[in-house]
Image (cartoon, rainbow, N blue to C red):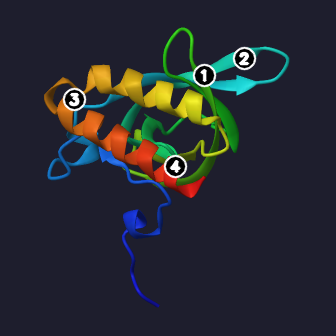
């Protein structure tokens, strides 16, 4: 069995919003979001911080004491909520859990809008993220 990096198996490239040389529990970079449980209404589960993002999903840090179900909504802004499936969970520390989120079933419009919102938070790398967005859109259009 080979030990592959998750990026090698992704359909869409991820954009990292933090310095990988710093342990996750010590990082301050990322995009704040809110995780919601959808029943009849959306109920807040907890706040989270997106650490990496792409058209297909994201990685987020959440408090380890929160119970996050398999299907959630990720509130990226007051006007945008993404339906996501938790595809993996990894304990980072006693207080933090890393969640792998898949929102590839969302529309291209919503996924692009989400990346545009994230680009506003990533001030240091906004040009790189904009190039990344263009490449991702070109890849989607080439698949059509």
Cα separation between marks 3 and 1: 22 Å
Q: Secondary structure at mark 2?
A: strand
Q: Secondary structure at mark 4?
A: helix
Which residue ends up furthest to the bottom in the rendered image? Answer: 1
Q: Which residue is mark 3?
A: 126
The label on residue 81 is 1
* Sequence-wise first label, 1 or 4: 1
Query: Callout 2: few (<14), some (14-19), or many (20+) C-alpha neighbours within 10 Å?
Result: few
Nearest the viewer among 75 and 54 is 54
- Determine the residue positioned at 49% across, 24% down: 113
Query: Callout 3: few (<14), some (14-19), or many (20+) C-alpha neighbours within 10 Å?
Result: some
Q: Position of residue 67 (x, y in %)?
A: 63, 36
Nearest the viewer among 44 and 67 is 44
Query: Callout 1: few (<14), some (14-19), or many (20+) C-alpha neighbours within 10 Å?
Result: some
The answer to whether any part of residue 93 appears in the image is no
Cα separation between marks 4 and 3: 21 Å
Q: Is residue 24 left or right of residue 107?
A: left
Instruction: Check if mark 4's residue and mark 3's residue have beta carbons within 8 Å.
Output: no
The answer to whether any part of residue 84 appears in the image is yes
The label on residue 140 is 4
Q: Which residue is mark 2?
A: 42
Instruction: Check if mark 1's residue and mark 2's residue have beta carbons within 8 Å.
Output: yes
Q: Nearer the viewer, mark 2 or mark 4?
A: 4
Give residue 116's quadrant in the image.
top left
């Amino acid at each position: 069995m080979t030990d592959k990096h998750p990026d090698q198996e992704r359909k869409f490239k991820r954009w990292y919003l933090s310095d990988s040389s710093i342990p996750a529990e010590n990082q301050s970079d990322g995009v704040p979001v809110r995780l919601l449980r959808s029943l009849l209404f959306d109920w807040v589960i907890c706040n989270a911080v997106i650490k990496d993002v792409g058209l297909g999903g994201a990685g987020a840090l959440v408090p380890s004491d929160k119970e996050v179900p398999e299907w959630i909504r990720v509130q990226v802004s007051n006007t945008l909520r993404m339906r996501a499936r938790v595809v993996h969970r990894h304990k980072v520390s006693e207080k933090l859990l890393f969640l792998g989120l898949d929102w590839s079933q969302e529309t291209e419009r919503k996924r692009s809008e989400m990346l545009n919102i994230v680009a506003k938070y990533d001030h240091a790398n906004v040009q790189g993220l904009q190039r990344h967005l263009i490449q991702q859109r070109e890849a989607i259009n080439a698949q059509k």
